[in-house]
Image (cartoon, rainbow, N blue to C red):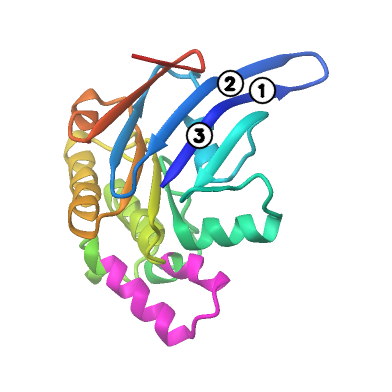
Amino acid sequence: MVKLKNVEKVYRTESIETLALHDINIEVEKGEFVSVMGPSGCGKSTLLNLMGLLDNPTRGEVEIEGNPVKSYGDRKMAKIRNEKIGFIFQSFHLINDLNVVDNVEIPLLYRRESSSKRRKLALSALEKVGLSARTKHFPSQLSGGQCQRVAIARAIVGKPDLILADEPTGNLDSVMGGEVMDILMNLHENEKTTIVMVTHDERLAGKTERLIRLFDGSQVD
């Protein structure tokens, strides 16, 4: 599904150069559930940004479904992000002025879908995360766990092949975190969605099929 070959990422300013990732070689197979762990600042979020085509490597190559993306223009990259990749963030990133169902519809606004089809897909996604009764609520009226479920519904509404989850349970207590993890496990098992999840929780990582560890920007055994 996604492959990183000899990837290096360097951030430069006028006064400093920071090596965020060094010599990364990772393959994630279609339908696999992979977790990424490591201390803060080791490059986990940078890794997801490269996999999600939100950033470009300084050196090396990123492939999506066997196709190198370095030659793609901005329009092509945006199309892949919108149609093939769903993003889940620790901080939810919901729009407070929109109700739940309108938040979930946002990725579909960039496709040529009718309003009725957008609404049907959004309601279906909310049903999968157990929020059919909260469609007209606003984020301020929801718990943290419910907000994260809305964020998951938004990530899956376009039926992406790959979900990238950056600390999806990081702001939640253990009970709510467990509920969110159950949703991800169901997506993986029942819909064969490929998932790459950054986490600090060894218990959650143990539920995934494979663990990638990073330390100071490098892969470790």
Q: Quadrant of residue 132?
A: bottom left
**204 or 50, which is in the foreground?**
50
Mark 3 belongs to which amino acid?
Answer: Leu
Mark 2 belongs to which amino acid?
Answer: Ala
Q: In which quarter of the image is residue 126?
A: bottom left
| Mark identifier at residue 4 | 3
> CB atoms at circles 2 and 1 under 8 Å apart?
yes
Task: Label 2, secondary structure: give it.
Answer: strand
Structural distance between the alpha carbons of marks 3 and 1: 15 Å
The residue that label 2 is drawn on is 20
Q: Residues within 10 Å of mark 2 (few under 14, many from 20)?
A: some
The magenta span reads 104-126
Task: Label 3, secondary structure: give it.
Answer: strand
Q: Which residue is drawn at 20% across and 47% down?
A: 185
**Mark 3 vs 2, N-terminal side:** 3
Q: Residue at x 66, y 16 (%)?
A: 18
The residue that label 1 is drawn on is 10
- Secondary structure character of the magenta stretch overall: helix
Residue 124 higher or lower than 86, as above or below: below
**Mark 2 vs 1, N-terminal side:** 1
